[in-house]
Image: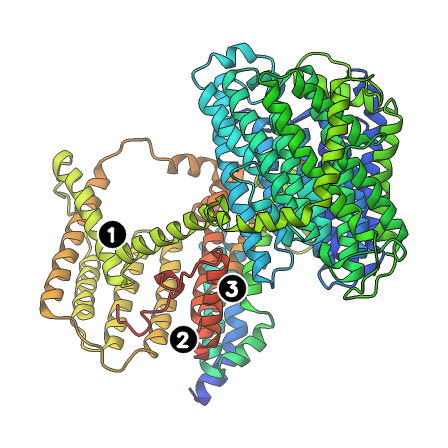
Amino acid sequence: MAVGMLTAILSGFVLAILAPGLNRMVRGGAGWLLALLPLGLAISFASHAPLIASGNVFSESNPWVPALGVDLSFRLDGLSMLLSLLITGVGALILVYAGGYLAGHPQLGRLYAFLLMFMGSMLGLVLADNILLLFVFWELTSISSYLLIGFDHERAAARSAALQALLVTAGGGLALMAGLLLLGQAGGSLELSTLLLQADYLHSHPLYLPSLVLILIGAFTKSAQFPFHFWLPSAMEAPTPVSAYLHSATMVKAGIYLLARLSPALGGTDAWFLSVTTVGGVTMLLGAWLALTQSDLKRILAYSTVSALGTLTLLLGLGGTLAVQAAMAFLVGHALYKGALFLVAGTLDHQTGSRDVDRLSGLFRAMPITALAAGIAALSMAGIAPLFGFLSKELSYEAALRAPAAAWITAAAVTANILLAAAAFIVGIRPFVGKAVPTPKPAREAPPSLWLGSVVLASLGAVMGLWPALGTDGLLSAAGTAVLGETVSIHLSLWHGLTLALALSAVTLIGGVIVYVSRGLLRRLASRWESLGQFGPARWYELVLLGLNGLAGGQTRLLQSGYLRYYLMIVLVATVGLAGATLATRGHLVKPTDWSGLHFYDVGLVVLILMATMGTVLARTRLAAIAALGVVGYSVALVFVLFGAPDVAMTQFLIETLTVILFVLVFYHLPETPALSSSLARGRDAVIAATVGVLMTAFVLIATVVQYQPPISEYFAEHGLPDAHGRNLVNVILVDFRGLDTLGEITVLAAAGIGVYALLKLRVGKQRGTASAARRSELAGGVDDASLPIANPMRKEGDVP
Amino acid sequence: MNSLILKVATRFMLPLLLLFSIFLLLRGHNQPGGGFSGGLVGASAFVLYSFAFGAPETRQALGVDPRGLIGAGLLVALGSGLLAFFVGQPFMTGVWGQLDVPGLGELHLGTPLVFDAGVYLVVIGVTLSIILPLVEE
């Protein structure tokens, strides 16, 4: 490609960083400006489409972690091309739409940033050839989806929906990672292009079944398949442009993409066929039924998306030329009409103040452009000729008719399509016809930014239906070739003759109209079954979350006493037990024999340390104990001075000084007279302290004579000056030889510092403390975790350790 | 604490201690010192100041929020490691250059010093983030 694929992906992330600033500079028009990048990318991709259509595949690779076999390798074939065009093309429209939809919103810049970050991640996902790279982008899309669903973060519903989506998809992501690694192990490569060529070998490999199950869990959670479908309707808490982009046109297709991508390697077995078609079929029917029971436009669309994803899964499960052709055509068709309808739903909400289908009517006169786009998209969704939706539905009927168990699958497909056709009429036609009713906001036609997207998408659906040869054939063929692993050519046409599929289409249409007319009856019927929802997967999710919180609470109560002295005791006793036992069984004590190097001041220092230690233990007041402890510290620093470690000594002096200051400051806030421990407790502590002391002494004595490996200090001494330009070895090790460790350490130091700061500033029991506790409990999905000790880190305030 | 001697002495000690801390930072590569001990001396200087004049004045003298120093230090340390990329070396490889200073002779300058400056800032930031709120209480 002229523009490297890596560059294309990274450009999304770079622009994401710049977007908020740009939004501040160009008030209002930033969406149009930002859309230029995805538009440019789309054009760049499209310019390569003819080459892809004629069977070419582009690939590029940059080393990343060569030692682990992980490369930044990308591959552009028909399937990636199809999705890349969707991602960038729809992305451009969404950025424009978002600018109009949230005009004047204080955090619009942030929304742009998240959307662009998502676009980059999604592009990476569909272009990646390395499976670990694919996984990284997979998780990045989950994270951007989390940020986008929770965009309106001040509403509890948005936060808990965001968390739900993240937990479900990232939980599936973990399974996916395990599955991909197993697959990589079985196939001996992390590159998809290599793995896809060894289907027969993989099918007979013992790791095939485990990796299949894990990968399917990943794909099903991401693409909202039953029983993981519940997060998608909840995700409608996101602003509408987000729902249209992520939760209809692109991100939820990631699971479908993965199934399609891996089907040459994993597909074609009974296990694949049974699990994928069953899950897909159930999801298709369930989603279509639930769509009809809703009255909120976005929720109707969300459930119908669930149903469409089920259809795609079903088709990929069936496999074979016809089903894959149908899947590819439906993938494109669905993105076009569903994206358009979502944008229409958002526009209606924005212009009238309501998304309730029962409160919207007769809007054609007020909003003719939106109405036209909605009508075309709805007819495409209902599968009416000559729109693209008709072509893809026709193909899927043909695939169903030739599938194993054709009667069942065809019946399920027709049922689902009837329900979806009715849903299409409800969303795309119902609000615009009939008598105009007053809406919360007086209805007016939307500004161009709010109708451009739906008009473009809807008309594309019409154009591609009327002239299927308009480039789509070639691209769909290339995509089908990528999915099947063998060359296919797809020729879409409106007229196939008087086939059974055409008859089924007619049945679907008539059925759809009947269901649409009797929708009131159906909704009443459904409301009677509503109580069944309590036992559905959404409830399982709640229960699992509740159980996890309970488990965390229980084990915290069990293990975390909150008393520093007990933690210390556990650590010390465990050390003495484990290390002491090893020493007693394997070690041999070394008696120091050579005392000649000893000076009188060494002895004096030891005596000083011992006396100060006694003073610390026996002190009656805290201040005295701290002062005595300080003497111990300074004396140890003197030991370092005597034995030629000025750096360590200096640091020890400084730390000792600051420690004393800290202790004094903290003790200032404690009660005047400390409650002294009982003599029994003191005796126990003395025993522990003494054993630790004995153990450490034994270690030091042994360490002077035991040498398992040649010491590394010689290497440092040799290379310090020539390679690292430094004579102070301690410092050279810290900032150069072991610089990465130091970077990690200062990061930990920073985190610890911020943690202490937060604890110091936390006022438990006052207003702020309770408010933050309530916020945490909402974050846990509405589960009340106030009983957790963690929720109250300062509950031992005033305790004397 | 209201002691004239302490206040007057501290006014002189603060700049001296800060100079000393920078001295420690700069000499660290060849002589005892370095970012960690330098940072501790720098933090001690401000702690002393807070004893003499109280926390609000110390914050004013510091000029920035100590939490900001933590972030800045981490960024400086990370950035010094990234510089190696510009000469095609792996992350955190030391990059050295020479500078001729009239009157002083040749100066060896490298990214490890920048890294150490990051450590210096983090140490000051963390220490003061913990101690200043305690002094305020």
Residue A371: % across, % down? 85, 49
Image point 52% across, 37% down: which residue? A173
The residue identified by callout 2 is: A765
Q: Is residue A13 visible?
A: no
**Residue A647 appears left or right of A217:** left
Q: Residues within 10 Å of mark 1 (few under 14, many from 20)?
A: few
Q: Which of marks 3 and 2 is in front?
A: 2
Q: Identify the residue shown where x is 72% and y is 43%.
A: A516
Q: Which residue corresponds to mark 1?
A: A571
- How far apart are the alpha carbons under marks 3 and 2? 29 Å
State which chain disc 1 sits on: A
Q: Residues within 10 Å of mark 3 (few under 14, many from 20)?
A: many
Question: Of label 2 and label 1, which has the lower sequence position?
Answer: 1
Q: Which of marks 1 and 3 is in front?
A: 1
Instruction: Identify the subunit bearing mark 3.
Output: B
User: What secondary structure is marked by label 2?
Assistant: loop
Q: What element carries label 1?
A: helix
Residues at marks 2 and 1, common chain? yes
The residue that label 3 is drawn on is: B125
Give the side of residue A798 with respect to residue B29, left or right: left
- Tag 2: residue type? Gly
Residue A592 point in image, percent of width and height: 14, 44
